[in-house]
């Protein structure tokens, strides 16, 4: 009965890849493949940055689909991309368990609008994937936004830096023993990460690296 209903649903509402519009998929295998390869490496504010994809029209569609569209396939691809990058970071830097994942906080307004905490959902999935690969990691959301900030989407790099200046603080200073990694789903100008680094550094917390699913090209990142 269920299969019959599902078949009828696909006849009335056929699936199309949200990236390339190919029929039969939410995200086709060809559009999934760039999220499942080997991570890229760069530097951001003096820290090692690991990320899977360059930021472009296709990757922005998938990020938006996961963040604002609550698409499970898109979210899982982002989670797998971040997991793969963390796994490489842990291996190359020879980090010892446990790993503390500190995510960039979303504003209360964004969480209320979406009805969920997008980056927290991703973090939980990433921790499960790491655990399946014998890497112990904890969700350590110690950063919080302490003042209102403007919507970043239409701001340039300098405006974003000023907009987020002293916007983050620590909810508490308790970290499990082990490495600290900063994680976000997307890095464009690097302003959010830079502000997070400031807040953690002032609290004397050492950050071993930065991981994201998607980042802009080398020349655009703030160093």
Image: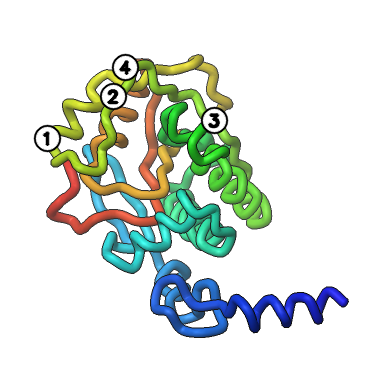
Crowding near the residue tagged with mark 3, few <14, some 14–19, many ≥20 C-alpha atoms within 10 Å? some
- The residue closer to the viewer here, 38 or 125, is 125
- Which residue does the numbered mark 2 point to in the structure image? 198
Question: Mark 3 touching mark 1, by CB under 8 A?
Answer: no
Is tag 4's residue or tag 3's residue first in the polypeptide sequence?
A: 3
| Front one among 5 and 112 | 5
Which residue in the structure is indicated by mark 4?
Answer: 202
The reply to whether callout 3 and callout 2 are in contact (CB within 8 Å) is no
Q: Which residue is mark 3?
A: 140
Per the model, the C-alpha gap separating discs 3 and 2 is 17 Å
Residue at the spot 18% in from the left edge and 31% down from the top edge:
161
Task: Give the alpha-carbon distance from disc 1 to disc 4, as whole Å.
Answer: 22 Å
Name the residue located 62 percent from the left edge and 54 percent from the top edge: 129
Question: Tag 3, which secondary structure?
Answer: loop
The residue indicated by pointer 1 is 158
**Could you tell me if residue 91 is visible in this image?**
no
Residue 221 location (% of width, % of height) = 19, 47
Question: How much space separates mark 4 and mark 3, taking CA atoms?
Answer: 17 Å
Quadrant of the drawing holding the C terminus? top left
């Amino acid at each position: 009965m269920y299969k019959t209903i599902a078949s009828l649903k696909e006849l009335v509402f056929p699936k199309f890849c949200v990236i390339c519009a190919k029929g039969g998929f939410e995200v086709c295998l060809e559009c999934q493949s760039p999220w499942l390869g080997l991570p890229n490496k760069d530097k951001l504010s003096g820290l090692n940055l690991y990320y899977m994809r360059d930021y472009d029209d296709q990757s922005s569609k998938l990020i938006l689909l996961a963040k604002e569209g609550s698409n499970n396939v898109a979210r899982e691809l982002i989670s797998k991309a971040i997991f793969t990058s963390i796994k490489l970071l842990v291996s190359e830097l020879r980090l010892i368990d446990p790993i503390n994942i500190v995510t960039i906080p979303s504003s209360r307004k964004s969480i209320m609008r979406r009805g969920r905490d997008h980056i927290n959902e991703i973090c939980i999935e990433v921790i499960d994937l790491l655990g399946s690969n014998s890497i112990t990691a904890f969700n350590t959301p110690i950063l919080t936004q302490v003042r209102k900030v403007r919507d970043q989407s239409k701001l340039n790099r300098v405006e974003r830096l000023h907009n987020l200046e002293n916007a983050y603080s620590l909810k508490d200073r308790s970290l499990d023993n082990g490495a600290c990694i900063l994680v976000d789903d997307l890095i464009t100008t690097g302003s959010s990460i830079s502000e997070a680094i400031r807040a953690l550094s002032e609290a004397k917390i050492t950050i071993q690296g930065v991981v994201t699913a998607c980042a802009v090209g080398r020349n655009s990142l703030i160093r």
